[in-house]
Image (cartoon, rainbow, N blue to C red):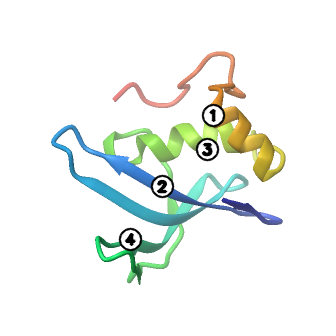
Amino acid sequence: MSVGKDEIRYTMVTKSQAGATNVSYEGIRCGTFEFRRYAYGHRDNKWVMSKNETWRPINFYAANRPRAVLTQEYFCDGKGIAGSNEDMIFRIRYNRSLVKNKYTGSSF
């Protein structure tokens, strides 16, 4: 994880209910509530660059939900970045959400 002037970059590891694991290297912009996928991890421990390098809106629907929760609850305070790497890791590790009333987005 790294925190820049207007972007937070991190590695996301997700596991489906069926057991499939996906690894991606991504960036989030708090100011615009957008994400960008930079690379995908593969079983051979190599990264493959993403073919789609555009910034896309974050929403609360199925595949984007983990990204939306990270953004809203741990990475961003409104449209600003909420602290340092260490601050964000602490919040995630100890489930210290920035939002008192969680999940203000869609209920889907």
Which residue is situated farthest in the left direction here? Answer: 18
Q: Quadrant of the C terminus?
A: top left
Q: Assess whether mark 3 and mark 1 are in contact (beta carbons under 8 angstroms).
A: no
**What amino acid type is highlighted by mark number 2?**
Met
Q: Which residue is mark 3?
A: 71
Q: Earlier in the sequence, mark 2 or mark 4?
A: 2
Q: Earlier in the sequence, mark 1 or mark 3?
A: 3
Q: Earlier in the sequence, mark 2 or mark 1?
A: 2
Q: Which residue is mark 4?
A: 41
The residue at 50%/47% (across/down) is 67
- Could you tell me how far apart the alpha carbons at marks 1 and 4 are, in whole angstroms? 23 Å
- Could you tell me how far apart the alpha carbons at marks 2 and 4 are, in whole angstroms? 10 Å
Q: Which residue is mark 2?
A: 12
Measuring from the top left, give residue 13's x and y in whole percent. Answer: 42, 53
Between circles 4 and 3, the one closer to the viewer is 4
Which residue is situated farthest in the front direction here? Answer: 44
Q: For residue 98, what is the image quadrant?
A: top right
Q: Earlier in the sequence, mark 4 or mark 3?
A: 4
- Could you tell me how far apart the alpha carbons at marks 4 and 3 are, in whole angstroms? 21 Å
Q: Which residue is mark 1?
A: 93
Measuring from the top left, give residue 1's x and y in whole percent. Answer: 66, 59
Question: Badge 2: how crowded within 10 Å, few (<14), some, or many (20+)?
Answer: some
Q: Earlier in the sequence, mark 1 or mark 4?
A: 4
- Left or right of residue 25, residue 62 in this image: left
**What amino acid type is highlighted by mark number 1?**
Arg
- Could you tell me how far apart the alpha carbons at marks 3 and 2 are, in whole angstroms? 13 Å
